[in-house]
Image: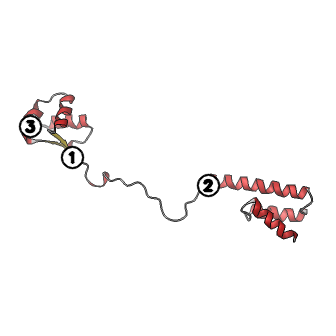
Amino acid sequence: MNLSKKKALAAKTLNVGKNRIVFLESRISEIKEAITKQDIRDLNKEGAIIVKEVKGRKRNTNKKKRSVGNIRKKVNKRKQEYVKMTRKLRKHVAGLKKDKKVSAKEAEDIRKKIRNRTFRSKTHLKEHIGGLKK
């Protein structure tokens, strides 16, 4: 009683491996008569053909867990933020220099500090400049 062809047909029809297909011994005669894919599907619905669950770890695929600690931003994102902040601060310093509120030497020192990312924001820069004036 060789049912390997039937098993192959069932595996192909139900989109599973041959090893996962199990035929019920009591319904073997019906399985032998099954010729078409539709016959196989009907027998599967009726419970004559059983599909075993996947063994082992494949069934419980855990999503990739995030690591603990600092999560770095992408380099391009960090660079874009740096460029925006630097341009904003330099523009502010240029305006102050033009209005003669800051000397050329002070403006140059401030620009160096901007380059080194000393200031978190425009407000932080203004506080620093206010401290210079006192």
- Mark 1: which amino acid? Lys
Q: In the depicted view, which residue is nearer to us: 74 or 50? A: 50
Name the spot of residue 114 as percent of width and height, x first: 77, 61
How much space separates mark 2 and mark 3, taking CA atoms? 63 Å
Residue 110 position (above or below residue 4): below
Q: Is residue 61 left or right of residue 114?
A: left
Q: Crowding near pointer 2: few (<14 within 10 Å), some, many (20+)?
A: few
- Mark 3: which amino acid? Ile
> Residue at 70% across / 56% down in the picture?
82
Q: Is residue 116 left or right of residue 96?
A: left
Q: In this view, does 54 lie to the left or right of 26?
A: right
- First reached walking from the N terminus: tag 2 or tag 3: 3
State the SS at label 2. helix
The N terminus: image quadrant: top left
- Mark 2: which amino acid? Val
Name the spot of residue 55 as percent of width and height, x first: 25, 52
> Residue at 92% across / 59% down in the picture?
100
Mark carried by residue 28: 3
Task: Report the residue marked by disc 1.
Answer: 52
- First reached walking from the N terminus: tag 3 or tag 1: 3
Proximity of marks 2 and 3: CB atoms separated by less than 8 Å: no
Task: Report the residue marked by disc 2.
Answer: 75
Proximity of marks 3 and 1: CB atoms separated by less than 8 Å: no
Q: Is residue 95 left or right of residue 121?
A: right
Name the spot of residue 102 as percent of width and height, x first: 89, 62
Q: In which quarter of the image is residue 131?
A: bottom right
Mark carried by residue 81: none
How much space separates mark 1 and mark 2, taking CA atoms? 47 Å
Q: Crowding near pointer 3: few (<14 within 10 Å), some, many (20+)?
A: some
